[in-house]
């Protein structure tokens, strides 16, 4: 029983990452009709925003402390982050500790800019080209982005710890009268993603902007005929989708040490999620994200693996294949999206 | 000749000649010269040209003719490699049964995966092939370890049965061969400052690749090839014209999967080990890159693309800042550093960046790839020649 | 007994009765037009004939065999060729290749792995295609890229692709929709020429009265999913029921 609950929570955390990435992917597809193979790279850039901020925060100057000596008898060199000297050790230290959540503030403008630049600079020339061309050019872009990141940050994963308060585990079994310990940060990640998903839906549901975008997703031409400049809104939509991917990445940094190829690793999974949910369906992406996350966690339980060896490795793909063949439009897809 | 019209025959003969002369053509610089590092005429690299060229030729039959973009062809390459190594272990070190087995096994896999995946088209087809390939890759790493030897990769051992080879006790690992001719053996020809290496392995790959190229030429020119192009052009019209497009696309998928399996078998024949990383989806992506860079849908394009990318991978990646400083030493110091810094980003470790940028440029501006680029340049020259000719009488 | 016999066909889309008890009989060697105002169910009927839609009830017999439940390519193999509203051709292939594909389909059936012999060796097929192109006066353009043809030529090419199969029934789906008057007249002339040269059965779905009355030998008027009347063009002209369907005179 404990194992099941633990896996359930594991699944929620995995599922929330899948759902966030897939949400942006399907948003781009639904609004712009573009298949974006560089979406995984956006997730990776988000994660590296966290790395960047924590590096910037820890830029230090060196002073010599004459009261202490090192093992050679020279005065001890002390590194003090500028942050601490500017804001005092309390605030500075706190900022340093909280660099991952603080990086959210960095991620949003960075991702909006990246999204805007991508859409205006590249994607917009591919609206009328076949989907295969879109896949190819964004695949090329993904390679470029990951190589640029590799140049600046190297090929090795970079550990980016969560704030020290969130490092431990919490007993999530207490409510059931059991002892099930679960990493705090993963809980935080789940809650965070729920907030982001909620925000995206609320934005689309309750703002005029969102209404126009939803109308545009349903019928682009008609909305264009109404004299609404749908293109400008779609550009912003691309920025928002990029931000969602970036946010998914930045908070994921403490869970998976960022490395330059994490985007490609997540890309396949997120595509699978999008197709299972139904191309262009936002609720579908969220539903499929959590569903596949949970399935994967359950399948990796020892009891299940004993019955069907290796099932944890392939369950997601198996489900995707079955769904694609039996429900071509995915769980919640609309009719006529990319059917030919 | 060869059942082809004179133009195609000439084309084929040129390709054969170029392939057979590759060890000489790719070593244009004397061994001692500073440019020798650009020589690509060493067996390991030339074998890769032939093998990946073969794989790209096969991929092109599917993607180039029918327009179905598969992101799972690396799975067939990997399956082919495993099949070949198993033949080495169980049957014989002769490469012929190994590559036959790898082609057939890959064909069976392609039939199963293609049968399911081709029920959908467009992006859904791409994702289905991607999902199947990832499944194969992950299974090779986990449950199928008894067959694939997991992360270590499948290797030869001293006590493999090798039924046909007599099963004598051996003291060192055997080498794949062709009726006694070892794949690793080679002879070197030294003329003046030049040095050329002719290896059995390369020539074996080259002959197989030429046969593969010839077959693809016949397919391109056949009614079958024409029908595949019709599928890419307008599948609805084809169905209303009385043709069932499904078996055509499936046949193309299986043929291209068998090419990939054959390429995997050759990889194992050159170096008898097989690992799961060959099956990763990014490896499938590499074949897509090759085909696009060279020119999708053209006969020579995929081969050129494969050669170009493998050349860059091996030669560009060797150039480091020291080499660059050597080249740009004539520039004033500050400028030299700047130029070297810029170039260094795109070579050595950064050559993938070059590849990505180039790929994007080609997809955006030159959908026909290198072949299309060459054609445009040729056309420009010809036009200039013509306009010159037209001017002269007027003067 | 006609070559095409439609009996009691019904088709509903949700709450909408698209076709209600349609009976239709197309006789061999006639040009039979099916006309009717927008939304009368003309396209639905056509889609039921070519295998794109399956009726809820009723039967569609062609040449004595049922077409229901068959795929478009099977129906084509039975002898029905179709011309689309906007010409559907293989835009990336050359003109002659466009005509050769249907020749292969006729000779080799719906699938044949014909991957080794080159197309150039297929002298019979090439000859057949060239004769057809000469018939529609396009022989000089045989090596042109089909996608670069003018709209009128695309229409001719599509006709050639259908006719080269020597279909027992040629279905035309609004062949002049969206055309200028001159193009429409050219198409009418082309169809008349075709009709004059060979025995052929044609079923034309059409909106344009001018086209219908210049070509058809029999006319069926469809209104609200049901055949209103079937007769010769002369009797249809000025028939009160037809005017009612088209102009809604009942309300006046």
Image (cartoon, rainbow, N blue to C red):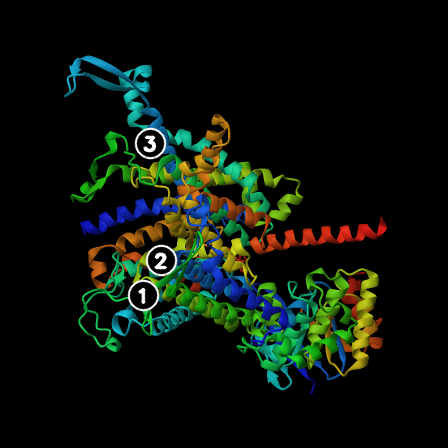
Residue B292, given in percent of the width and then of the height, sits at 52, 55
Residue C97 lies in quadrant: bottom right
Residue designated by label 1: B82
CA neighbours of label 2 inside 10 A, class few (<14), some (14 to 19), many (20+): some
Give left or right: position of B212 versus A169.
right
Q: Secondary structure at mark 2?
A: helix
Q: Which chain's residue wears label 1?
A: B
Res. B221 mark: none
Residue designated by label 3: A100
Image height of A174 relative to B210, above or below? above
Residue B103, given in percent of the width and then of the height, sits at 39, 71
- The answer, for residue B227, to whether it is visible in the render is yes
Q: Residue at x 29, y 49 (%)?
A: A11
Q: Nearer the viewer, residue A4 or B250?
A: B250
CA neighbours of label 3 inside 10 A, class few (<14), some (14 to 19), many (20+): many
Q: Which chain's residue wears label 3?
A: A
Q: Secondary structure at mark 1?
A: helix
Disc 3 with disc 1 on a shared chain: no
Q: CA distance from mark 3 to mark 1?
A: 44 Å
The image quadrant where one finds the N terminus of chain C is bottom right
């Amino acid at each position: 029983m404990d194992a099941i609950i633990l896996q359930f929570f594991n699944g929620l955390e995995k599922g929330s990452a899948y759902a966030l990435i897939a949400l942006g992917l399907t948003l781009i597809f639904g609004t712009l009709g573009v298949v974006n193979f560089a979406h995984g790279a956006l997730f990776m850039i988000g994660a590296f925003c966290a790395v960047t901020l924590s590096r910037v925060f820890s830029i230090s100057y060196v002073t010599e402390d004459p009261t202490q000596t090192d093992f050679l008898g020279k005065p001890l060199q002390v590194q003090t982050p500028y942050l601490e000297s500017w804001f005092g050790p309390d605030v500075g230290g706190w900022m340093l500790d909280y660099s991952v959540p603080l990086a959210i503030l960095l991620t949003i403008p960075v991702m909006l800019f990246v999204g805007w630049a991508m859409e205006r600079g590249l994607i917009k020339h591919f609206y009328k080209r076949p989907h295969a061309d879109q896949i190819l050019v964004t695949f090329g872009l993904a390679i470029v982005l990951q190589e640029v990141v590799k140049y600046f940050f190297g090929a090795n994963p970079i550990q980016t710890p969560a704030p020290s308060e969130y490092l431990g585990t919490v007993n999530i079994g207490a409510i059931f009268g059991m002892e099930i310990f679960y990493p705090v940060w993963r809980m935080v990640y789940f809650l965070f993603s729920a907030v982001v998903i909620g925000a995206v839906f609320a934005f689309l549901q309750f703002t005029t902007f969102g209404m126009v975008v939803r109308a545009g997703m349903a019928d682009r031409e008609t909305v264009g005929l109404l004299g609404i400049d749908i293109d400008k809104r779609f550009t912003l939509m691309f920025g928002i989708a990029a931000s969602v991917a970036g946010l998914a990445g930045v908070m994921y940094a403490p869970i998976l040490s960022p490395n330059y190829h994490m985007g490609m690793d997540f890309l396949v999974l997120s595509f699978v999620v999008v197709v299972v949910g139904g191309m262009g369906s936002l609720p579908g992406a969220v539903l499929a994200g959590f569903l596949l996350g949970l399935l994967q966690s359950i399948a990796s339980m020892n009891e299940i693996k004993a019955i069907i060896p290796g099932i944890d490795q392939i369950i997601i793909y198996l489900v995707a294949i079955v769904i694609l063949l039996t429900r071509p439009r995915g769980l919640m897809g609309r009719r006529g999206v990319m059917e030919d | 000749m060869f059942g082809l019209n004179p133009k195609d025959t000439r084309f084929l003969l040129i390709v054969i000649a170029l392939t057979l002369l590759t060890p000489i053509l790719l070593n244009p610089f004397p061994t001692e010269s500073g440019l020798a590092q650009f020589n690509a005429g060493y067996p390991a690299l030339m074998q890769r040209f032939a093998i990946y060229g073969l794989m790209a030729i096969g991929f092109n039959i599917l993607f180039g003719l029918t327009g179905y973009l598969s992101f799972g062809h690396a799975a067939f390459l990997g399956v082919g490699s495993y099949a070949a190594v198993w033949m080495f272990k169980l049957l014989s070190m002769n490469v012929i049964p190994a590559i036959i087995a790898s082609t057939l096994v890959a064909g069976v896999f392609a039939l199963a995966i293609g049968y399911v995946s081709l029920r959908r088209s467009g992006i859904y087809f791409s994702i289905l092939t991607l999902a199947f390939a990832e499944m194969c890759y992950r299974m090779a790493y986990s449950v199928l370890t008894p067959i694939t030897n997991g992360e270590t990769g499948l290797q030869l051992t001293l006590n493999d049965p090798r039924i046909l080879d007599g099963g004598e006790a051996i003291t060192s690992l055997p080498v794949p061969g062709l009726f006694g001719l070892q794949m690793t053996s080679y002879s070197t020809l030294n003329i003046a400052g030049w040095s050329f290496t002719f290896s059995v392995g390369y020539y074996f790959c080259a002959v197989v690749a030429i046969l593969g190229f010839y077959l693809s030429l016949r397919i391109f020119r056949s009614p079958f090839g024409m029908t595949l192009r019709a599928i890419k052009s307008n599948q609805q019209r084809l169905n209303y014209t009385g043709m069932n497009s499904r078996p055509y696309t499936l046949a193309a998928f299986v043929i291209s999967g068998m090419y990939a399996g054959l390429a995997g078998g050759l990889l194992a024949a050159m170096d008898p080990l097989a690992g799961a990383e060959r099956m990763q989806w990014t490896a499938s992506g590499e074949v897509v890159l090759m085909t696009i860079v060279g020119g999708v849908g053209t006969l020579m394009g995929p081969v050129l693309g494969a050669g170009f990318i493998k050349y860059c991978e091996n030669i560009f990646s060797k150039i480091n800042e020291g080499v660059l400083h050597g080249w740009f030493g004539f520039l004033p110091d500050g400028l030299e550093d700047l130029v070297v810094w810029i170039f260094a980003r795109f070579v050595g470790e950064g050559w993938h960046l070059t590849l990505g940028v180039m790929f994007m440029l080609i997809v955006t501006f030159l959908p026909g790839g290198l072949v299309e680029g060459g054609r445009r340049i040729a056309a420009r020259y010809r036009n200039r020649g013509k306009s010159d000719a037209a001017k002269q009488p007027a003067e | 007994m006609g070559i095409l016999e439609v009996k009691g066909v019904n088709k509903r889309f949700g709450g909408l009765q698209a076709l209600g008890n349609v009976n239709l009989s197309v006789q061999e060697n006639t040009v039979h037009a099916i006309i009717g105002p927008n939304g009368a169910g003309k396209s639905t009927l056509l889609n039921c004939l070519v295998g794109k839609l399956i009726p809820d009830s009723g039967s569609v017999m062609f040449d004595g065999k049922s077409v229901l439940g068959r795929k478009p390519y099977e129906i084509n193999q039975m002898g029905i060729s179709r011309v689309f509203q906007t010409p559907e051709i293989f835009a990336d292939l050359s003109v002659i290749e466009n005509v050769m594909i249907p020749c292969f389909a006729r000779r080799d059936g719906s699938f044949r792995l014909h991957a080794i012999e080159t197309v150039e060796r297929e002298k019979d097929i090439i000859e057949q295609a060239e004769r057809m192109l000469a018939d529609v006066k396009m022989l000089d353009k045989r090596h042109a890229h089909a996608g670069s043809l003018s709209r009128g030529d695309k229409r001719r090419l599509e006709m050639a692709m259908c006719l080269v199969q020597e279909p027992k029934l040629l279905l035309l789906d609004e062949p002049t929709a969206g055309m200028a008057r001159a193009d429409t007249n050219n198409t009418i002339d082309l169809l008349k020429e075709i009709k004059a040269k060979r025995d052929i059965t044609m079923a034309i779905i059409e909106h344009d009265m001018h086209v219908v009355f210049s070509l058809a030998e029999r006319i069926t008027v469809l209104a609200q999913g049901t055949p209103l009347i079937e007769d010769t063009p002369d009797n249809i002209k000025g028939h009160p029921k037809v005017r009612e369907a088209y102009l809604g005179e009942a309300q006046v």
